[in-house]
Image: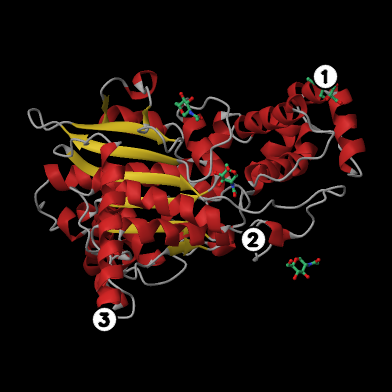
Amino acid sequence: MFQINWKLCMFTISNVIFVNAISSITSTKDLSTLQLVQIISRHGDRAPIHPFPTDVYRNASVYSLNGWGELTEVGAKQVYELGVYLRQRYGGFLPRKYLKRDFLILSSDVDRAIMSAEANLAGLYELGPVPRSRDIFKEWQPVPIHTIPEEDDNLINTGFNCPRYKTLINQYMNSDELKKLNEDNKEFLDFIQKKSGMETVATLEDTFQVQDALRCQRFHNLTLPDWVNNTVYDQLQYFKSLSFTWKVATEEMKRLKVGPLLERLVGEMRAKVDAATLILDDEGFSPYEDASAYRKMYIYSGHDSTISGVLHTLNLFQPHIPVYAAALLIELHRKPDTGEFFIEFYYRNDTTVEPYRLDTSAVCGSPCLYESFSAFASKFIPMNWNQECQLQSTQSLSPSSGAPRLLLMSSSSDNGGQDLTLSAMHPLGITAPGLLGFVLAVIAITSLLVSTILLSSFLREKQRAMQYPLNAYQHLG
Ligand SMILES: *[C@@H]1O[C@H](CO)[C@@H](O)[C@H](O)[C@H]1NC(C)=O
Ligand SMILES: *[C@@H]1O[C@H](CO)[C@@H](O)[C@H](O)[C@H]1NC(C)=O
Ligand SMILES: *[C@@H]1O[C@H](CO)[C@@H](O)[C@H](O)[C@H]1NC(C)=O
Ligand SMILES: *[C@@H]1O[C@H](CO)[C@@H](O)[C@H](O)[C@H]1NC(C)=O
């Protein structure tokens, strides 16, 4: 009896010390102006995507028992640590008790991203040290993790389902600029081909399989092949870090690959701004009915390319490979005196220091006002993503809708209140005998049509402005 209590006591004490140790390296963040936090994170350490032919570590279990590309135990700890940090930074803002309306986490449909979301939540929503045998739900709470099927994902793991984007990236990879870069490094490519045993290493892109496997080996303290000195290693990593800019090299590529996520981020911010600045309007729309008006935090559990895509689109990307569990923290604040909303961007790419505040003065000014950011982002937000992607419209629910989000997000019909446009258009079945009746009917129908068109375009604006986050949320829920 005594022994067990003593152990529990030690466990509690060590936990307190652990938590205090973390707080002592972290300055207290002023949360009084904070309105919303949006986080884009990378998964934790994983096994290589694929070994190369001469790789001596050809068994994925060296890294993870689950196979190539899967999250490792170390990786899970990294993201757990991110969750603990987020609790520490935002504890005064986000209640420790999970409430649906406060929080939403959305993951790409890739195992390592979903598992990272779980590990992150374990840190963020941990309740405290209670022995499991007694009651696990006093210590741990289930929190739903939403995912987007790969074929629908234009937010987190993007680019695969957009034909136009595929054409553009192919064009770019075959552009004179890239051809020259490949030619200039021909000797290096031949060297990698010979040593890795790969059949063809004709382009820098072909080296990434080797680059990735070596990076994982080094991270796991494995002995690298003898042909890999620091120069070779760094050169491989350098080209990989450049490649993040190739993926979103042009404005059109940014629109297609990153635009929908930017639209969503801005929409989530707008819901907060609207909720604070609008009261019920005469149409009876209340922003407070929208779950996103209450939301305090969103987490997007994704990939290196998710982070680099957003950073590069905002002109904030300096070529690098985002580290495991890297996180972009986007904070919406409100000035107490003027009521203006402004945004701060932080990049957590190093767990030993506080996140770096990114300089957004060239993007949206300093402070970065919500309106300026929204105006900047709008350049990259497609009016109709389906159309710009040149997708066959077989998925479309309503060909008249100009809003891509509705088409994309509404593959389930669980979207009450979205068919306003359609129901408003139902013509009344007036039958009037005689000429006068006919003329009156024409006048009535014409004015009905005109007002319907006006009303429906008004409602569509309304939907655009107010309901996007809600629709997306409902579909994904
Ligand atoms: C990989 O390693 C595991 C554990 O060491 C072993 O059980 C398994 O048979 C190995 N697989 C292959 C294909 O060699
Ligand atoms: C590699 O070695 C370092 C230093 O000993 C250690 O801190 C780290 O945890 C090791 N990495 C892995 C993945 O085991
Ligand atoms: C690293 O290896 C490459 C290829 O073998 C060689 O050309 C280079 O001189 C080496 N660099 C150093 C610093 O040893
Ligand atoms: C992290 O990002 C900041 C801001 O971009 C940069 O200055 C810093 O060198 C990066 N640190 C690491 C370890 O990559």
The residue that mark 2 highlights is 64
Secondary structure type for disc 3: loop
**Quick one: 296 or 375, which is closer to the camera?**
296
Q: Disc 1 on helix, strand or loop?
A: helix
Residue 452: percent from left, percent from top: 27, 57
Height in image: 433 above or below 185?
below
Q: CA distance from mark 3 to mark 2?
A: 39 Å
* Left or right of 264, for residue 200: right
| Cβ–Cβ under 8 Å for marks 2 and 1 | no
Sequence order check, earlier mark of 2 and 1: 2
Q: Which mark is residue 1?
A: 3
How are the colours assigned in the image?
secondary structure
- Residue at the (42%, 54%) spot, across then down: 80
- Residue positioned 40% across, 50% down in the render: 81
The residue under the point 42% across, 38% down is 351
First reached walking from the N terminus: tag 3 or tag 2 = 3
Q: Quadrant of the N terminus?
A: bottom left
Tag 2: Cα neighbours inside 10 Å, few (<14), some, or many (≥20)? many
Q: What residue is shown with label 1?
A: 184
395 over 1 or under it: above or below: above
